[in-house]
Image (cartoon, grey):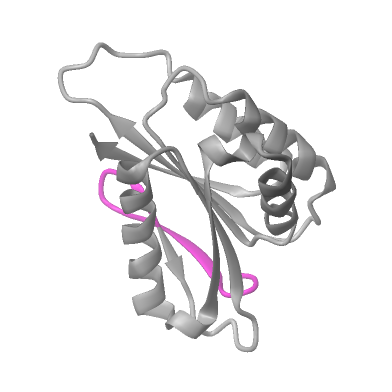
Amino acid sequence: MQNGLVLEAGTGWDRLAIDPRGAGHALNVVLIYEDAEARRWAKDLFDRAARFAGPESLHPSWWRMGDLSAPGVLAGAVSTALRADVVVVATHAAEGLPMAFYVWVDAWLPHRPQNAGALVALLGKRRNSAPSSGRVRDYLNAVAREGRLDFVIQEQAA
């Protein structure tokens, strides 16, 4: 555990837990989501972590993927990602994300301090959908590796 961040195995998927013993350090959490449903998934995860750690232990920053194409929004999202202990990405996409999302990642990832942290992927899985190759999952896993972030994935019924 470093900076109060603990990742623990769950049943069927990994879950994020925040250890409140990381005294004196509030965790910066960036939550980036595709749409209203994906935002609900991220909010549910954030609310669970806040109940465990206490709301004063977490500093959230919320960004909608579609808004990243605006330069001012992109700059703010890059700035918060640089300081993030936890990055949560919530999306239905399996094969690709909006171009602005990739621009956002390319803007902060090479400059991120080498602190402990996690990238949490909340990925929607449509009922009765054909299996996909999971390019988004693979991409986010590669981002986590490059950023030396623990990678946690949770599939959401969509």
Task: State the extent of the magenta-drawn residues as a range.
Answer: 1-15
Residue sitting farthest toward the left = 128
Percent position of residue 53, x then y: 43, 79
Vertical placement of residue 117 versus 68, above or below = below
Residue in the image at 40% along x and 64% along y: 46
Q: How many marks?
A: 0
Q: Is residue 140 rendered magenta in the image?
A: no
Percent position of residue 153, x then y: 42, 42
Residue in the image at 64% along x and 70% along y: 2
Residue sitting nearer the eye, 35 or 143: 35
Quadrant in the picture for residue 127 = top left
Quadrant in the picture for residue 123 = top left
Percent position of residue 82, x then y: 74, 55
Residue in the image at 76% along x and 45% along y: 108
Residue sitting nearer the eye, 103 or 8: 103
Residue in the image at 51% along x and 20% along y: 96
Q: Is residue 12 rendered magenta in the image?
A: yes
Q: Quadrant of the C terminus?
A: top left
* For residue 94, side relative to residue 48 (left or right): right
* For residue 108, side relative to residue 118 (left or right): right
Vertical placement of residue 60 versus 88, above or below = below
* For residue 140, side relative to residue 143 (left or right): left
Percent position of residue 81, x then y: 68, 53
Quadrant in the picture for residue 68 = top right
Residue sitting farthest toward the bottom = 24
Q: Quadrant of the N terminus?
A: bottom right
